[in-house]
Image: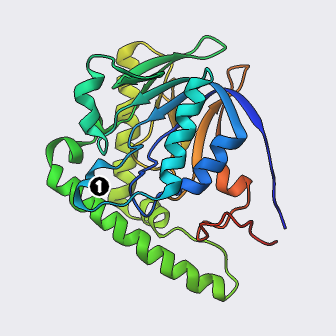
Amino acid sequence: MNYISPNSTYRAIWISDVHLGTRGCQADILLDFLRHTESEYLYLVGDIIDGWRLRRSWYWAQSHNDVVQKVLRKARKGTQVVYITGNHDECLREFSATALQFGSIRLEDETIHTTADGKKLLVLHGDRFDGVVKHARWLAILGDWAYTVMLGINTVFNLIRRRFGFGYWSLSAYVKGKVKNAVEYVGNFEDTLAEEARKHGVDGIVCGHIHKAEIRDIGGIMYCNDGDWVESCTALVEHFDGRLEIVHWAKQRAFDPLSRALEPVAD
């Protein structure tokens, strides 16, 4: 067995696109991440709760409640928790306009984080710069439905692959990487976010929304996307020297994405 049990402390952690309230949410793996990591700052960068899906049909597993309780416990113990609203939890935006606090958790649409080495990062979800979400909401909802269907197909396909001894393979990641329009969409999104950071006069930007974890330089702006907790199970972290890194938690812990019991994958 390849099973790592790390306990890590960071200066800041960013997570987004958890989609609590959906069957695709990897709440057990996220809970494991939260139990094994500590930080001074914890940024929840939108789409933590999936209000779109919950309005259509109710689903709320115990593990989803456990994630909420764990975040609240971290806030009570001194972690500075900031909840950035996204499009799937847009119902909270009427409260974020007044910088409302839920207990020790600050609710905002965007914020600025200053790293240990003095770099300023704009933190927002990113949906406001997605033309589909902004101008064709019906198409965004249709896309959300299609993504859910794709996740279901992906699960069945990978169960078959596992029976034949093959490893996990993400259909949605393949589509994003190969379909020309999807590649152009991601590229345009990243460029637009970098331009927004430039307008704010900051050194970089941290976002979510497109479920594609990445750190790269775009014209002198540090673009960071913390990924998601539906498939990739990734987080962006800041070390105490200001260095940023993407943590691929499911891979690092060698968890089987198809198992809800957090069983390590055998070598």
What is the basis of the colouring in this image? rainbow
Name above or below for residue 155 compared with residue 8: below
Relative to residue 218, is residue 259 drawn left or right?
right
Name above or below for residue 207 compared with residue 252: above
Residue 216 visible in the picture: no
Q: Quadrant of the C terminus?
A: bottom right
Residue on which the image places disc 1: 54
Name above or below for residue 34 compared with residue 158: above
Relative to residue 64, is residue 58 drawn left or right?
left
Residue at left offset 53%, top offset 40%: 69
Residue 96 rendering spot, x and y as whole percentages: 30, 24
Residue at left offset 46%, top offset 15%: 202
The part of the image, by quadrant, that contains residue 189 is: top left
The part of the image, by quadrant, that contains residue 6 is: top right
Residue at left offset 15%, top offset 43%: 135
Q: Residues within 10 Å of mark 1 (few under 14, many from 20)?
A: some
Residue 65 rendering spot, x and y as whole percentages: 48, 49
Dot 1 falls on a residue whose secondary structure is helix
Name above or below for residue 106 compared with residue 174: above
- Front residue of 146 and 22: 22
Residue 58 rendering spot, x and y as whole percentages: 31, 60
Residue 138 visible in the picture: yes
